[in-house]
Amino acid sequence: MMQTEFINAMRGLLADELPDFLRAMEEAPALAMRINPLRPGAFRAAEAFLAEPVPWAKQAYYLKPDARPGASFAHDLGAFYLQEASAMVSASVLDAQPGEKILDLCAAPGGKTTQIAGAMMGEGLLISNEPVPGRARVLAENLERMGVVNAVAVCAYPDQLAKKWPEAFDGVLVDAPCSGEGMFRRDPASRGEWQPGSPAGCAKRQAEILDSAAGLVRPGGRLVYSTCTFNRTENEGSIEGFLSRHPEFHPEPFALDGIGASCDGMLRVWPHRVRGDGHFVAKLRKDGCAEGRRERKARRRAEDGSLRELVERLERESCAIPECLAEGRLIRQADYVHVLPKDAPEMDGIRMTKPGLCVMKVGRSHVQPMPALARACGEGRNLARAKRQVELTEEEMRRVRLGERLEFDREPGWTLMTWMNLPVGFVKVRK
């Protein structure tokens, strides 16, 4: 049961709509998924689970009532990301474009950041940040599962990034920690954790994050702020406070199919009006123009020529890295070689949980392609290309999932296993 103080606060926001809202909060949540545009076979692999499209997000669908996609091979292989429908709103408003520099400041577990990555299609730079180490590892795992090649996952507090990368990004998303009132339907247990003072405490933290985010946006760039809560304090109140502290920003109008137009650059998603949980999103534009601005370039270290030779060997023997990473910076951590996107900023002092794309492990006399490289394989210049490939049957895929090793009568060497045209991983075929 929802607390009386919360219901009274909603009455002040909704008036006559309150009964409809309370009924909607007792209904089942709207389960949905996004098809991964980086996976050529993704739609076919997910089609059996899909109902009607989610109006406000690209390649997004509600699930059939009896669908259980989380247990499927297709989910394991990154064909889709399971995500509540309203949670797709903020990345849709950000509208990231290929070639841009984007920062997702509060990115774990990765739903919005992988939505952004899909829109960028491997071009440009995506920095996905999560300050909590355990959550940052989950974020890195989801980026790898979805085959994202142009992302760097970092673990830092927003003020640290603001000092390190001033005015470095075309777009910044702040999906802020909040009191979570919009999740009361999906997680009824959270209703008992809510306190009347929760919004004010969250708003203070949100103000600190937003102030850091302001310094990360380039002149002419955009800042998108979102919460999954209902109260004015954390929503309109946080934006009004931010604008009073940062007059260089102004609201930018937008509209979303199925929801409607913003008011003063702000839009609410109500569960009794649309098929989704509670959400709030605001879009702000920073004054100025990108043209003529002086960019701070990352300091380019002299690269170890032996790393380039190792990549060339990898490509001769097993798999070519994506063309979009051809100019990226190679870094070695212990026995592992990663490729940072070419536009990655200076990383000194920043903890990376996913330093670009992990392409190989270096042995004493061999190089081994890594699972992250396999997940990045597919068709197109922004995906890796394996020299050898074998398509698995349903039974073979089941055995791989159980950890069994398969043997193939094929040309020897590292071979990419696929299932329904989705990359599974590399196997060493022996003579």
Image (cartoon, rainbow, N blue to C red):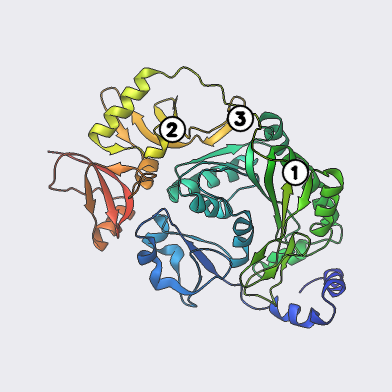
Cα separation between marks 2 and 1: 34 Å
Q: Position of residue 413 (x, y in %)?
A: 20, 38
Which quadrant would residue 209 be assigned to in this image? top right
Residue that label 1 marks: 287
Which quadrant would residue 195 be assigned to in this image? bottom right
As drawn, the label of residue 350 is 3
Q: Position of residue 68 (x, y in %)?
A: 45, 69
- Which marked residue is nearer to the observer: mark 2 or mark 1? 1
| Residue drawn at x 16%, y 39% as measured from the top left | 412
Q: Position of residue 23 (x, y in %)?
A: 72, 81
Q: Quadrant of the N terminus?
A: bottom right
As drawn, the label of residue 332 is none
Residue type at the position of mark 1: Asp
How dense is the environment of label 2, judged by Cα within 10 Å: few (below 14), some, or many (20 and up)? many
Determine contact: label 2, label 3, CB under 8 Å: no
Residue that label 2 marks: 339
Q: Is label 2 in a helix, a strand or a loop?
A: strand
